[in-house]
Amino acid sequence: GGTEPTIADCDAILGRLNPHYFLGGKVVLQVEKARKAFEEKCARVLGVGVEEAAEGMIDMLEADANNALRRVISGQGIHPSEFTLLSYGGSGPLHLAGCSRGIGFKDIITFQFAAAFSAFGCTTADFMRRHSVSTQIDIGARASDDELQAFGAKVTSVWDDLTKAAVDEMVADGHALPKIKTVPFLMMRYTGQLEDVEVVAPLSAVGSADDMREVIAEFEAVYAKVNHRVSRYGEAGFSITELGLIATADKVKPMLVKRPLGKSDPASAHKGVREAYIGGRWHKADLYEMDLLQPGHEVTGPAIIEHPATTLVVHPQDRVHVDEWTLLHYTHA
């Protein structure tokens, strides 16, 4: 392929990728060529060894992803211990350990079809239409009941128009009207602030002053989750900058096969040993075939779990457990 060093080159140089099993062996990786290019263009320039430079590049990539996850989590105002991280894509499991380490997720999961998970999501996700329009509705902190009711009428009118447009499109696509669900939402902020917060409307229509107050209360609750509670500033008033509606129709979902848990010893999936550079030194990593792992199997690192379309690197002392759905749960030491 190309002549410039890549992250895949780093993984191959460090023994994390099997050069003879990339895409199930359809593509043979030229590790020595990659090593030579990396030495000339990276390691020598940095004044370090090839392995140190290659792992440094991977560490930088994974640190960026790790920090991005932390930003998303803090921006949503949620705690990682309440959520599960799904690792997918061809290289997702390859870098799962570094991308997730230290964040504290409730669980970390990958799967045999990780490389095709995006396509799986597209084919199994519910049908959806999302419509929205920009607006500018400024609600004073001391708005009267009449003013609040008038603002609510504006909001409801826009939602009605968006509902008709979205539902008409769904019906034209062949969805039965009774099967279509609609959920209105708003983009709101405290007047004068720069960032909006998306708020799922607690009501399908805002028909009274109290309904409008309920919408505002929902905004303040969402805002407090995303930002520090002390930054709320209701005295400034409230601005609605966008009104939207999501219309959905269910799609038939596949049935995953549940099987009883068996023995923890993964010997039946073991396929050998390979030197892999992890954490600044070479390790003898056990190799496993991902498709041969069975419910109940447990793998302790250093190990590499291979699949024709992806690779899961298990760092030293970390563990992988296969559950009854054949999902792979990654646990940091």
Image (cartoon, grey):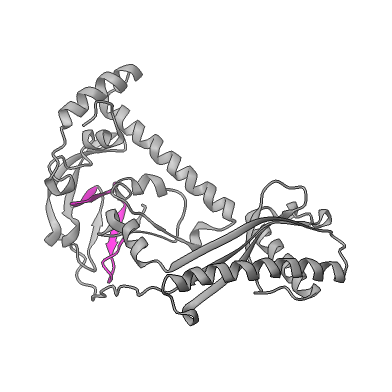
Splitting the image into 4 quarters, where does residue 136 fall? bottom right
Residue 221 lies, in percent from the top left, at 68, 64
Vertically, is 238 above or below 57? below
Determine if the magenta segment contains residue 322.
yes
In the picture provided, is 207 more to the left or to the right than 5?
right
Residue 265 lies, in percent from the top left, at 18, 63
Residue 276 lies, in percent from the top left, at 21, 39
In front of the other: 102 or 119: 119
Determine if the magenta segment contains residue 316.
yes
> Which range is magenta?
303-328
Residue 150 lies, in percent from the top left, at 81, 68
Q: Residue drawn 47% across and 70% down?
A: 170
Vertically, is 43 above or below 106? above
Q: Quadrant of the N terminus?
A: top left
In the picture provided, is 94 more to the left or to the right than 228?
left
In the picture provided, is 206 more to the left or to the right than 122?
right
In front of the other: 15 or 238: 238
Splitting the image into 4 quarters, where does residue 112 fall? bottom left
Vertically, is 202 above or below 235? below
